[in-house]
Amino acid sequence: MITAQPRLRAILSLSITAVFIGGLIASQWLLTDSVQRMQFDARLAPPSLEHWLGTDALGRELWARTLAGLALSFWVGCLAALLSTLIALSLAALATLSARLDALVSLLIDTLLSVPHLILLMLIAFALGGGTQAVIIAVAVTHWPSLARVLRAELWQLRQAPYVRISRALGKSRWFVLHGHLLPHLLPHCLVGALLLFPHAILHEAALTFLGFGLSPSQPAIGVLLAEAMRYLNGGYWWLGVFPGLGLLLMVLTFERLSSQLRRAL
């Protein structure tokens, strides 16, 4: 009964996350032109029954732009987290092939971990010219070291398992041992690792966009909405920054909760 509780909580968190993602994706089919439709007679309107979360400086509905921004952040975060997980898994597997490769991977991990994340993100995004693709690459390239270190340690521990030693004694190649015995055990770690990387990915995407190194200002990204809100907060238009920020916080906490519950269950 005690061991079943973490699994039940993981299932509950997974269900809540699935409903959240499903609602977010379904909203994009229902929004149609609401994201970019301007209402100049309702500029900077406060939240009301007619304008649920208020409007921005061009009269665009803030609820529609917030949902569109969260959906965009979700896809960017998914791609960045998956790419980062693949990089971490590839380098961790490469480190098990020889002592020299292991030393090289360890040096690369330590080097990237010693550089501040945000500064490295800004440099890579600026070098690639900004935009969605640049943000995905920048986030993916900078977020793999922590996961790679965990996967590398797990692989080195698995190499000492009896069935791995027997497989080597039977003359199996290193690639066979890696592909047939070691990598299947890393799938749960990769799943949890990708979920843990996802909140960091969307937060750094929003930060890059807010600072002007990320997505285009024409896109309804959360970072763009927060950057636009900074111009009007002193005028008392609090809803321009509060609701996009709360939406981003809700998404981050949802996936953070899911990853924590899955880590306990697995």
Image (tube, rainbow, N blue to C red):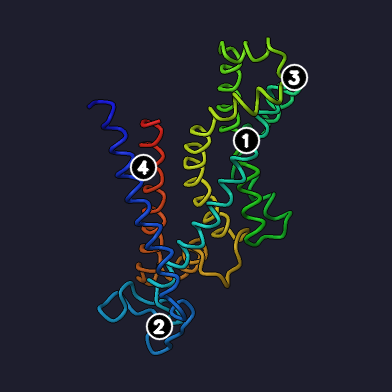
Between 170 and 227, the one lying in front of the other is 170
Q: Residues within 10 Å of mark 3 (few under 14, many from 20)?
A: few
Label 3 sits on residue: 98
Which secondary structure, mark 2? loop
Closer to viewer: mark 4 or mark 2: 4
Left or right of residue 46, residue 40 in this image: right
Query: On screen, 45 above or below 119?
Result: below
Closer to viewer: mark 4 or mark 3: 3
Q: As shown in the figure, which amino acid type bears the numbered disc 1?
A: Ala
Q: Residues within 10 Å of mark 2 (few under 14, many from 20)?
A: some
Labels 2 and 1: the sequence-earlier one: 2
Q: Residues within 10 Å of mark 4 (few under 14, many from 20)?
A: some
Q: As shown in the figure, which amino acid type bears the numbered disc 3?
A: Ser
Labels 1 and 3: the sequence-earlier one: 1
Which secondary structure, mark 4? helix
On residue 257, which mark appears? Answer: 4
Label 1 sits on residue: 88
Q: Disc 2 to disc 1, how far (Cα)?
A: 47 Å
Query: On screen, 168 above or below 175?
Result: above
